[in-house]
Structures are given as C-alpha cells and as structure tokens.
Image (spheres, rainbow, N blue to C red):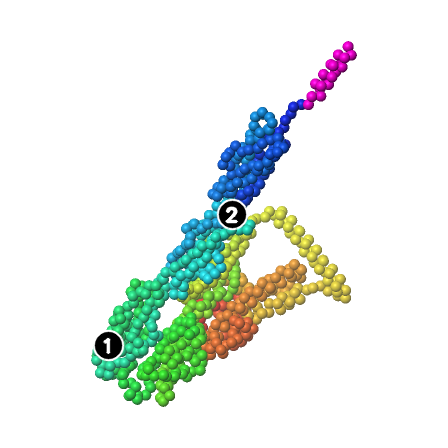
Amino acid sequence: MLPGLLILLSLQIAVQGQPALLDSRCYLDGGGSAESFLASEDVAVGAVIGKLRINGDPSAEHGDIKLSLRERDSPVAIAPGSKDIVLVTPLDKEGVRGPSSVYVNVICDRRHSNDPSFVIPVNIRVTDVNDNAPQWVGAPYSLTLSEVTVPGTRILQGARAIDLDQQGPFSTVEYTVLPGPHSDVVSFVSPLEGTLILRKALDYETLKNFTVKLRAQDQGTPPKFSDTTLRVTITDADDQNPKFLKDSYRGDLPIDGKTGELQIQPEPIKALDQDEGLRATLQYSIAPSPESKYFSINPRTGVLSLITPLNPIDVAQTVTLVIKATQVDNPDRYALTTLVLSRRDSKQTGAELAFLQPRYHARAREDLGVGSRVLVLTTNRPTRHLRFQILDKVQATFFSVSNAGEVLLQKSLDYENATRHTFDVRATDGVSNATAQVTVEVIDVNDWEPRFRESHYEFIVPKALLTAEPVALGKLEAADGDRNDRIVLDLKGALSDLFSIDSRGVLWLRREKPNITMVNLIATATDNGNPPKSTSVPVSVRMEGLALAQSTWAPGVLGAFGVVLTLFILATIGLSIYIYKSKNPKTTNRIHSQANSTTSAANLVSNEKKSGVTGGLKLAGGNMTIGNPIGGGHGGSGSSLSAGASTILAASLEREAQRERERDNYTATVRSIISRASAARNGLYDGDIERDSISNPDIARTTWGEAASNGNLARKKLSWGGSGDPNKNEIGSLDNIGGSTENNLTVYF
C-alpha cells in the first residue's frame, strides 16, 4: 500500500508542478493593439521615427520574434534586428515633396512556433514646420496713376502672397513696404491686407515714375519672406498754367508807321504748357486796350503785326501790350506777358526822359501778398537801364519800384488805416529825371467780425404788461471794425417769432407775453462784407410775476413759512449781536446801523452814480426797471443787513462789476478801431501806433476816459440815457436810440 501512495503522490506533484504555457511574444508592452508616432516634416531620411513596443527579441542570432512590414513601398522601414522605425523617404505636411501621413502594418512572427502571425497597425502623423516662404501672386506689380490722384486713394487692391504651410502662424502673411526711395509715397492699409493706398500727392513735373519694394513675411520663428516690386508710372494732368519763355518782351515801332510784321526782342513771343506730358495747344491773343486795335497776333505762332498805319503822333508814343496765351482745350489755363513797343530812333533823338503818363492809377486788395506786382510804370526809354525812387519815405515802406518800372508791394495794406496810397516816383537815367504820380486804391476785404457790447443780454417783461401793442424791452449793441460795413441783427430760437429787432438794435415784444417764465434766444450780428461774418450772443427774456401766478400756495403753508423765516431772522440777528459784542467789548451797547450800511453801499456803486444812472433804466412806460439793485427809495431806514444779505449784495455787485468790465473791453475795442482809422486819416500808420487799445488795455481805458472828460463819450452815454438828466431814469423816446457812425465805422449805441 505504501508504494502505491508514493506513486500517487509523485504523480500529483508532477501534475501540480507543471508550468503554464503563456507566450506574450508579439504583444504590445502595456497593452493595446496599434502604435502611433509623431514625426516632424523636416525629419531627415534615415532618422529613427520611433521604437515599437512589441514584446520579444527581434535580433537575428538569439531573437525569438521576427518583424516585417506588409507594405512593400512604404516611406518607412524597420531596421534589421531592431524595433526601430526608420524614415526612408522625406515627409511633407503639405503633401508636395512627400507624404503628409504614414499608415503601415507591422507583421510579428514567433520563431520556433507554428502560431499565426500578429498584425500591428502603425500610424505616423506628420507635424508642420515653417518650411515654406510666402509666394506673391501675380508679381511684380505695376500701376499707372494720374498726378491729380488724391492722397488716401486705394491704388492697388488684391495684391497677395500665399504660404503653403498649414493654417496658423506659419501661413499668416504680413505685408510691408520696404524702406527706400519713395517708400513714403505708398503704404498698406493693414499689415494683414494687401491693399495699397497713396500717402502723398504726386507731381508729374518732378517725379514721372518710381519703384518700391514690397515684402510678404509669415509669423514663424524665424520668419520666412519673399520680396517683389511695385512700379508706378505717373501720367500728367492739366494742373499747370502755360508759361511764356520770357517774363517780358520789347520791340520797335516802324518810323514811317507802315503796317507789317514787327521784330520782337530778345526772342520771338512763345509760351509752352507746363504740363510736360500734355503740352496742350496754345492760342495767342492781345488783351483789349486803347492801342490793341492797331495790332494783331497770329493765334498759332505768336507773330505780332501792325495792321493799322500809325499817325506821327501815335508813332511818338510807347505802346504797352498784354499778350495772353490760352490753352485751346481749357480756357481757364492761360499765361500773360507784357510787350513794350517804342520808336526805332528813340535812342538817337536825345529826347529827355519822360513817363508816358503823368499819373498812374491801380487798385489792390488789402490782402494782396507782399512781393506782388501792383502795376508797371512805362517811360519813353523802355530799353534803357533806369533807376526809380519813391519820394515819400512813408509810402516807400509800403511799395518799391524795380529797374523795370514794376511797382511791388513791400508791406501789407490795411483798408481801415488807409483807403488809398498816393506818392510820386522819380525815374533817372543818370542825365535827366522824370516824375509821375502813382495812386493805389485799396480794396476792402472783410477781416473784422461784429462784436456785441455784452456777452449775455437779459431783459424783463413787466408783470402788468397787458397791451397788445409792440413794446420795447431794451437795446442790443454791436460794432464792426471794417470801414463802411453795416450790421444786421437777427433773432433765433423756439419763440423768436414773438420778438423782433429793428435797424437801431431795439428788442421789441411784438404781442402779448406768452404763458412761460423764461424765453432763451440767440441774437446774431451779421455784417455786409464779402464774405459776410457774424457773431452770436445769448439773450434771455424773463416774464415778471408769471412764476408766482402759476404756483399758488395754501395760506397755512405761507403762514408756517413766515413763522420759520421770522425765527431764522431773529436768530441771525441775535448771533450777529453776540459775535459783535464778543469782538468789541468796549462798545457792547453799539448796534450796526443802516446808515453805515447805506454809506458802504453808496461807495460801492459810486461809479454807477457818476455815470448818471442813479436808479436804473426804465423801459416800456415805466413798467420795467433795469439798474442799480441797491439803495434809492427807502430813505436809509430799516433793519441792518444780515450776513446772508451781505453775501448776496457782494455777489450782485461783483456781477455788476463784471458786466462793467465787459462793457469797458467792448469800448476799448471800438475806440481802438476809431483811433487807428483817425490816425491813418491824419497821416499816421502802424509804425506810429504801436501801443493801441487792443494790445494795451490800460491805454484803452485812458483813451476812453479822456474822451469822456472831453464830453464826447458823455454825449454818447446821454443818448442812451434819454434826456441826459442824471436824476431821470427813463430811456427817452425810441427815436433817440439809433446807430452812430464815426469815421465810417458803424456802432450801435
């Protein structure tokens, strides 16, 4: 029995000790059924892309597995005796120079076994790199632009470059104009948009064509770029006037006065269109003049001929003609030159030097630029070298005369200072002299804006005003510094049709007052200059008593308010007495009297009383009062002013002082205008009035005060105050409210 047990035990041990037959060869380490790799498209051929995670040894000598690829022409291969996947052909994410992705099947066989082969899919994803530079489409570019193309115009749209890299920073293109000659003429609207705009004006006469370089660059690191060129050809436009080859010409009149072609010096008359690319055809003509009827000019060649025989008296005269060259296709483009014709034998006659006219007259705008030619003085010796001199030293600062007899402007003209300039000019040839009188009439230009006396006008419509007739509320005063300018006043606003302003500046309420408390308007003063100028100020009209009529309080509310107000006044008075006693212990029994307050107020408004306005200004038959808010009519009696009342009084006086300062500024401006005009009339000019009332307010106040002391200003103020009696407050009849004119300067007051 024991041997049987031993045999049974040995068999059981043999069965239990037998190892399990589990073969993991060709399985992926870590699990899974496929392999994936990432490969940059710039990986070199022969480089290892990745290592397979397959269990087993693929070496040739001691290996237990065998690896191979199912695909024959695969871009990758398995290195012999290893698990490495090697690149055979180049990769390209864009798919141009190689595959953009790789998918192969790896076959794994177990050596020394009859087990079937294992197939392991392998996916290789190719990643992008910045290996492509942007490429311009349709480059190089060329444009043709007119020289009158306005800066800011889009001159090229659709210029673009393509980057073959995958979408992202490697394929995002930015456009720039490379620095270089004329690179500031054009620019891209946006770095990301291939649209070019013109930045500077073009001129065919100075620049006929130019070339700039354009760059397209991606956003890689480092970036890749490509360059191209833009060639711009500029075409000429009709933006230039023709021009004569010489500034002036001269010629000889035939001695016998016979008709025929005239010889012109220093060369025949000729003009050219300055637009070189156009060279428009020109047509010559003679400007009409008393002498032009004797001559004709060939419209195509510019040859001048005498067509009417000249009398001996006509032959003795020197003739000045104005020749005009006009474009045939555009009459607005033309050029002028002068032609001076004289007797042939004027050099041998030995006649004395003389001006052809004893007096010359010209007109010039006051805004004519310095250096401009005003007129030409002609003599009987146009070909001789002469010297000209202005005899008046003052006028010599305004004008000069060149050796050719051209009167040139040396100093700006001012119509308000002088409406004309008259002076004598002496010409000499070194042997004899000649003198002529020159008068230059100044043409006015509207260079002053109207000015209101006040910056803000306020008027009050009396409570008792029930009449349907128009009522005068007050006066708007405005002045203009331009000589002979007239001012028109106008009202604008939502309720402007209720009011009107007459030619004297008086504001009228045309019908019964509206049911509102305040009307806000805009008053505009416009002159008749060319072009007209205007100034506006706000105008406020308050309807007196209307606010109280629109809101009625209950008697109980009014009584309560009166009690509270009485208690507040008593408390304020008691506090004022206490403070006064605490600060002045020696005079505890003294009380601040109304008389002192009245005296102080009287001193504060002494200027108002001195000006003759003692109680204010009454309009509309005494129904409205505008004037001093202090004193008058109370006899100096009543309770003393509280601290709050004093503050209100001070603020009121400050506002009145501000209004007085504004009136002084207006007055100073007007007096400055008048003084300069008067000075100019008396022979004074800008050099004699260096410190005028505008640049020196202290002189303006002194000048105004002197005028007032002489009675001139007083009379003007009395014309506003009615009869002029300082004890009367009325404005007087409206017939006296008119405009006055001094030195042709319109002033409303």
Residue 291 x %, y %: 27, 77
Report crowding for label 1: few under 14, some 14 to 19, many 20 or more residues within 10 A (C-alpha): some
- Residue 420: percent from the left, percent from the top? 40, 76
Residue 478 lies, in percent from the top left, at 47, 66
Q: Is residue 47 above or below residue 25?
A: below
C-alpha separation, residue under disc 2 versus residue under disc 1: 81 Å
Q: Amino acid at mark 2?
A: Asp
Are the residues at dot 2 and dot 1 in contact (C-beta closer than 8 Å)?
no
Answer whether residue 17 is magenta in the image.
yes
The correct choice, above or below, for 16 with respect to 326 in the image is: above
Q: Which residue is mark 1?
A: 261
Q: Residue at x 57, y 30 (%)?
A: 108
Secondary structure that dominates the magenta span: helix
Q: Position of residue 216 (x, y in %)?
A: 48, 52
Q: Please state which amino acid type lies under the numbered disc 1.
A: Glu
Q: Is residue 744 magenta?
A: no
In the image, what residue occupies the spot 45% across and 63% down?
534
- Which of label 2 and label 1 is nearer to you? 2
- Mark 1 lies on a secondary structure that is strand
- Residues shaded magenta: 1-19
Q: Which residue is mark 2?
A: 131
Is 711 displayed left or right of 244 in the figure? Answer: right
The reply to whether residue 305 is in sight is yes
Helix, strand or loop under label 2: loop
| Relative height, residue 199 to residue 479 (above, below) | above
Residue furthest right as drawn: 2
* Pick the front one: 489 or 644: 489
Of the pair 582 and 402, the residue shown nearer to us: 402
Q: How many marks?
A: 2
Name the residue located 74 percent from the left edge and 17 percent from the top edge.
10
